[in-house]
Amino acid sequence: MHWNLRSVVVHVAVMGAMIGGCDTKEVEQQASDTARDVAMVERMSEPPLQPVVPSPISDEDMQRYGLDRASCAFRKEGVEQPLFLAGSREGFTRIDNEIQRYAAKRATADLPGDARTSYVGLAGWVDLVRLPDEGTGAGQNHWPARLIIHDARERVAFTADGWVTCKG
């Protein structure tokens, strides 16, 4: 049996009420009240979502850190520099003026150049999702996509639509 704080508190409350000679309805009500209180405390203690806003990765960044080896790049519509670079082993984005590194998640779909559709980092993960490309002239190495950055609690911290372009 998996024990978490809520189940332990409920079990202790039920056992205490039973030992104290309370009737079944009282025990159930106490357990329900306790569970509600524990759930409220857990919700209140969860840190708020911290949205992230990646900034474009410059040509200078690519040269300095050797990021020009990446197989694919995600660019937001109307922005020349990429927001995310995807390679066979790792992916990169710039958040808070720092290059963030993500490991390629091997159990995800392949992109050209052995890049992946998901990358995992210390504080979350990144997904590249192909969007419908009817009439856009998209091909095997260039297609509409959505970049999604998740935080460590599986919440969406950033999303943008644009294009993925992979080296031929």
Image (cartoon, rainbow, N blue to C red):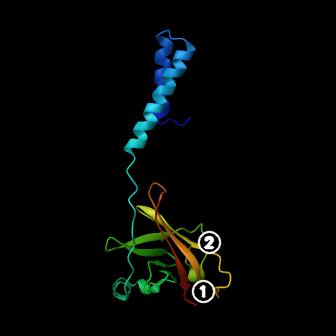
The quadrant in which the C terminus is found is: bottom right
Q: Position of residue 98 (x, y in %)?
A: 32, 73
90 shown above or below 46: below
User: Residue placed farthest to the top in the image?
Assistant: 21
- Per the model, the C-alpha gap separating discs 2 and 1 is 15 Å
Disc 1 marks which amino acid? Asn
* Mark 2 residue element: loop
Disc 2 marks which amino acid? Ala
89 shown above or below 12: below
How busy is the neighbourhood of tag 1: few (under 14 within 10 Å), some, or many (20 plus)? some
Q: Nearer the viewer, residue 89 or 151?
A: 151
The quadrant in which the N terminus is found is: top right
* Mark 1 residue element: loop
Residue at image point 57% right, 15% down: 24
Does label 2 or label 1 sit earlier along the sequence? 2
Q: Quadrant of residue 116?
A: bottom right
Q: Are marks 2 and 1 in contact (CB under 8 Å)?
A: no
Q: Position of residue 110 (x, y in %)?
A: 61, 75
Tag 1 residue = 141
Residue at image point 57% right, 83% down: 113
Q: Position of residue 133 (x, y in %)?
A: 65, 80
Q: Nearer the viewer, residue 91 or 132?
A: 132
Q: Nearer the viewer, residue 132 or 167?
A: 132
Q: Position of residue 61 (x, y in %)?
A: 35, 84
Q: Which mark is residue 109?
A: 2
Q: Quadrant of residue 57?
A: bottom left
79 shown above or below 89: below
